Amino acid sequence: MKLTLLRRCFGSIKRKMHQITSSSIVPLNVRGMKELDRQKFLRKLTVPILRIPEEKVSKITKTCKPYFLKMENIKPVQSATNSLFKEIILNPDKVTKWSDISESDYQELQKHGVDEASFITKDIQLGYDNFKYETIFKAVLPEGEETVSGFSQIGHIIHLNLRDHLLDYAPLIGQVLMDKIKTCRTVVNKSNIIDNTYRNFKMDVIAGDEDFLVTVKENQCQFQFDFSKVYWNPRLGKEHERILSFLKPGDVLFDVFCGVGPFSIPAAKRKCRVFANDLNPDSFKWLNENAKNNKINNKFFKSFNEDGKDFICNTFKEFIEDLCNGKEQLPVGAKVHVTMNLPALAVEFLKYFKHLITDKDLSEKINCDIIVYLYCFAVGDNPFDVAKRMVIDNIGVDMSSDILDIFDVRNVSPKKEMIRVTFKLTKDVLFGVDSDTEPPKKKMCINEVNENK
């Protein structure tokens, strides 16, 4: 018994080492292929089989599941030549002989009459349809180089950012993704350079239809847009959801760089009052289209096609002044939120908040929190410190104590993070009045009261 246990442990160690160093379930002789030839992916593979009585399949498959051969279009449990039996196809990277099965699983199988006599091998035919796209790319693309590390899907479009050494393989990569991802009809390669004015990517269609009109769902809203003319990043869906969780019915949102509305449309749908702005005329067009398609009530939504500076210095300023003058009313406890999601440039717009309102007397009358969510790219070993310094330097006031949160939204590239800095926009910034001291007029009134006593 001890010898059996030792043999099984040794076999398990060997098996794990084999899994780490190599895999037998890969396409052969396709390295460097640039034009997709599906026939060249045909190969034979010797696989281990457990032949078991058909009536015991349900009891045995639970034990065998960790050893299943999991490939596309291959059922791990199949009918045998003898109709009274079933065959369980095992993964040859995990099992090459009976002793590779763990002691506990071996004992469980024995309870159902399955032993080494049930273990056989046979050859099966593999083809292009059996391999996942990750396996195909690993077998075809240059060895030792970065492969297709990831991609995003927006509606029926998959977009890639291919490295230079992969550009010659672009048609093959595109076709493989179209074959393997059934909802994909178009594959584009987009450069890393974004037009900072309208946030457009340069893109090339490498496979499929030249159709950029997409429909996506996010936060219980449906968005439609021309992906070639506006910005949309599906990796930001969770961040959109986080910000929306901070908004309550009756709050106000100023979305300075709103795009097609991933913050604005769901916020308005939740009965926040929304002022949404984007300079890109195509974003503005689809923003309004999405508001209409999602049946947004106009009393909760107003859109603007302006530069961010004008939106802050006119629309936002006017609203705050009206709020102070009583022309605008907010429910008790409601807040004003400002989202600034233009990470390459948004910090440069913070200076327009400084002393935005010249009538200092109005500072006495503002009675709600104004919360800003500023997005930026921080490069360096300490991205939080970099982001904090960028915000303070650009707003021109040391408002360290008013920073509520610094959050790492996502990694962009080595030592480059997309960071959100959340802070309160105080009277000190907006009016040039120290929030911790009482306004002069109020002090004068107190003095007058004391003199009359």
Image: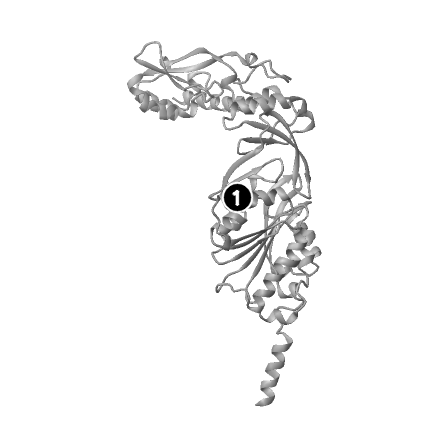
**Relative to residue 16, is residue 346 drawn left or right?**
right
Quadrant of the drawing holding the N terminus: top left
Q: Quadrant of residue 280?
A: top right
Is there any visible trace of residue 93 in the rendered image? Answer: yes
The residue at the far bottom in this view is 453
Q: Secondary structure at mark 1?
A: helix
Name the image quarter holding residue 423. Answer: bottom right
Quadrant location of the C terminus? bottom right
Q: Is residue 55 left or right of residue 203?
A: left
Q: Who's the residue at 53% across and 34% down the image? A: 155
What residue is rendered at 52% in x and 65% in y? 329
Q: x%, y% of residue 128?
A: 52, 16
Residue 127 rendering spot, x and y as whole percentages: 51, 14
Using the image, determine if residue 246 lies above or below residue 125.
Answer: below
Locate residue 437 relative to residue 47 in the image: left or right.
right
Residue neighbourhood size for the residue with mark 1, other residues' Cα within 10 Å, grouped as few (<14), some (14–19), many (≥20): many
User: In this figure, which colouring scheme has been used for the structure?
Assistant: one colour
Instruction: Identify whether 422 is placed above or below 155.
Output: below
Image location (x, y in percent) of residue 16? 51, 24
Q: Amino acid at mark 1?
A: Asn
Image position of 350 (left or right of 288): right
Q: Residue at x 58, y 14 (%)?
A: 37
Q: Nearest the camera: 361 or 16?
A: 361
Circle 1 is placed at which residue position? 290
